[in-house]
Image (spheres, rainbow, N blue to C red):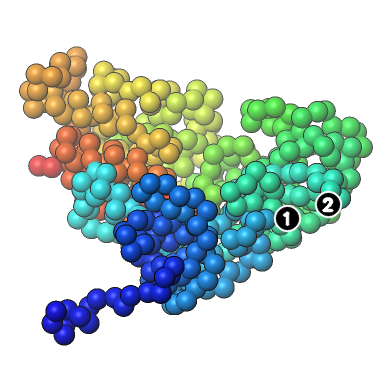
């Protein structure tokens, strides 16, 4: 062995010590034992040398919890939240508070690139600069569990403990807006005072630009005294608005009518988006504004373009696109959601601050998980698509696009779809994803079977301190 080669070989570690090589999607350090068996270690960071307590063993891997750091990563930081940790009882809402925020983003970028390559066999021509913003006080939506713990003589309100169904004993939460974090202990006192203390399992939080909505899930009808207690709490906490949810999300309703309703603004486009607290909206409003702006810049809609927004939701992308394109079609799977999207469009069209004007926009209901080439053709040719699916991805939609492309190539395995001779595929697709695995799967179909190339991709740090990876990718039609 030469002197140069010897210098590159890592020194042997004492027995039981492990050298961490990387971080996986669950924010576990990944190490290898001398026999090359993989060990996943909660709390360990890349390039650290650690000891761990192994608590699960399989044939090809082991899982353990960090017990000692012998050589610490330069990216390790002291968690801000007193409830973050590895021990039993620690809050499970965050997984990465012990890692410097910029390093968290680098890990997520690697997760995206690894998924695109290993699952989709593609590499983007350009890696986009990550979208990032405030790392504390950002979480404007949350589902807080409620539990009356008789043994402790208290009510708990918060996220679940790590790897547990129990509710963490949270007194503060730095990822929630400060005014909401400050309400955690008063909420515990409030719920403890209710006649319905045993039958209120959940409080869903939704913050708008002016209102904090608290949706109380109650399994039995509330007494008059309990409703009075809720009103007193709202009066003592300006901006708080109580909603009651006796059954499913569709049953949520205001305790008292009147007052401001929930909404958020997209000021770059002059758009105000009303929403209900049980609607799906992005958790992080700061990042959402940047996300919409970048998506539209990448889409590059022109005044001559027709654009389809697949999985349009309440119109988070549809309405801003309508300030730029000639015509927009928003498509969603729920008739009720499409009606809400159309209502939001009409409201914004009437608002004086919409000085850019909204172009012709329509909405349609489609089961987007059962798309076919025939349905795709029936929705007409669009110059550009924006695709923003749930975690399951947009497989059926992309598969239908693949089938039409293969028909154009004359593949015998793909019978001709009526009307497809004049239908044209979009020149550009901007795909916003909350699951890098399903994005990579769909990207592989687009690139290898539908005639596109991946011109750009990057991560969106929507959920700082968690392992959740949001991302965006751009696909252009090959000439």
Q: Quarter of the image holding residue 391?
A: top left
Please give the name of the residue rendered at 58% of the width and 41% of the height, measured from the top-left corner: 274
Q: SS for tag 1?
A: loop
Q: Can you identify the residue that label 1 sits on?
A: 169
User: Left or right: 268 with respect to 274?
Assistant: left
Residue 409: x %, y % from top left: 8, 27
- Of residue 2 and residue 297, the one placed in the foreground of this image is 2
Residue 194: x %, y % from top left: 87, 41
User: Left or right: 197 with respect to 441?
Assistant: right
Quarter of the figure that contains the N terminus = bottom left
Which residue occupies the extreme front position in the image? Answer: 15
Q: Can you identify the residue that label 2 sits on?
A: 152
Residue 47: x %, y % from top left: 38, 71
Callout 2–callout 1 Cβ contact below 8 Å: yes
Crowd rating for badge 2 (residues with CA inside 10 Å; few <14, some 14–19, many 20+): few
Q: Quarter of the image holding residue 412?
A: top left
Please give the name of the residue rendered at 48% of the width and 68% of the height, measured from the top-left corner: 51
Please give the name of the residue rendered at 68% of the width and 46% of the height, measured from the top-left corner: 166
Quarter of the figure that contains the C terminus = top left
Q: Quarter of the image holding residue 418?
A: top left
Mark 2 vs mark 1, CA separation in Å:
10 Å
Crowd rating for badge 1 (residues with CA inside 10 Å; few <14, some 14–19, many 20+): some
- Of residue 457 and residue 305, the one placed in the foreground of this image is 457
User: Left or right: 199 with respect to 441?
Assistant: right
| Residue 97 appearing in the image | yes
């Amino acid at each position: 062995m030469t002197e140069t080669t010897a210098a590159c070989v890592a020194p042997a570690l004492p027995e039981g010590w492990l050298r961490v090589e990387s971080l996986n999607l669950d924010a576990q350090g990944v190490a290898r034992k001398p026999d090359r068996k993989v060990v996943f270690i909660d709390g360990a960071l890349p390039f650290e040398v650690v000891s761990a307590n192994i608590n699960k063993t399989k044939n090809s891997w082991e899982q353990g919890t960090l017990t000692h750091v012998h050589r610490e990563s330069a990216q390790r930081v002291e968690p801000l939240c007193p409830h973050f940790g590895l021990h039993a009882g620690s809050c499970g809402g965050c997984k990465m508070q012990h890692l410097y925020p910029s390093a968290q983003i680098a890990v997520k970028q690697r997760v995206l690139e690894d998924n695109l390559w290993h699952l989709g066999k593609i590499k983007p021509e350009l890696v986009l600069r990550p979208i990032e913003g405030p790392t504390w006080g950002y979480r404007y939506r949350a589902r807080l569990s409620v539990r009356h713990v008789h043994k402790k003589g208290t009510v708990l309100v918060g996220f679940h403990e790590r790897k547990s169904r129990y509710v963490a004993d949270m007194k503060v939460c730095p990822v929630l807006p400060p005014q909401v974090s400050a309400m955690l202990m008063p909420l515990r006192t409030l719920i403890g005072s209710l006649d319905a203390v045993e039958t209120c399992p959940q409080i869903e939080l939704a913050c708008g630009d002016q209102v904090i909505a608290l949706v109380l899930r109650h399994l039995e009808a509330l007494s008059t005294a309990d409703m009075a207690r809720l009103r007193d709490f709202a009066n003592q906490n300006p901006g708080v608005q109580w909603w009651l949810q006796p059954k499913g999300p569709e049953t949520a309703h205001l305790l008292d009518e009147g007052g401001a309703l929930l909404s958020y603004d997209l000021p770059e486009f002059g758009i105000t988006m009303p929403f209900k607290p049980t609607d799906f909206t992005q958790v992080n409003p700061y990042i959402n504004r940047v996300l919409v702006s970048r998506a539209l810049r990448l889409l590059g809609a022109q005044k001559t373009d027709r654009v389809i927004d697949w999985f349009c939701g309440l119109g988070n992308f549809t309405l801003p696109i309508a300030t730029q394109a000639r015509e927009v079609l928003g498509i969603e799977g729920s008739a009720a959601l499409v009606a809400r999207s159309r209502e939001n469009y009409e409201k914004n069209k009437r608002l004086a601050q919409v000085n850019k004007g909204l172009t012709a926009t329509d909405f349609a209901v489609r089961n987007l998980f059962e798309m076919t080439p025939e349905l795709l053709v029936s929705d007409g040719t669009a110059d550009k698509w924006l695709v923003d699916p749930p975690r399951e991805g947009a497989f059926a939609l992309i598969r239908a696009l693949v089938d039409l492309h293969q028909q154009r190539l004359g593949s015998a395995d793909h019978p001709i779809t009526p009307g497809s001779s004049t239908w044209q595929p979009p020149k550009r697709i901007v795909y916003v994803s909350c699951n890098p695995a399903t994005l990579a799967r769909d990207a592989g179909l687009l690139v290898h079977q539908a005639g596109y190339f991946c011109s750009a991709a990057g991560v969106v740090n929507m959920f700082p301190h968690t392992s959740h990876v949001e991302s965006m990718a751009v696909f252009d039609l090959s000439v």
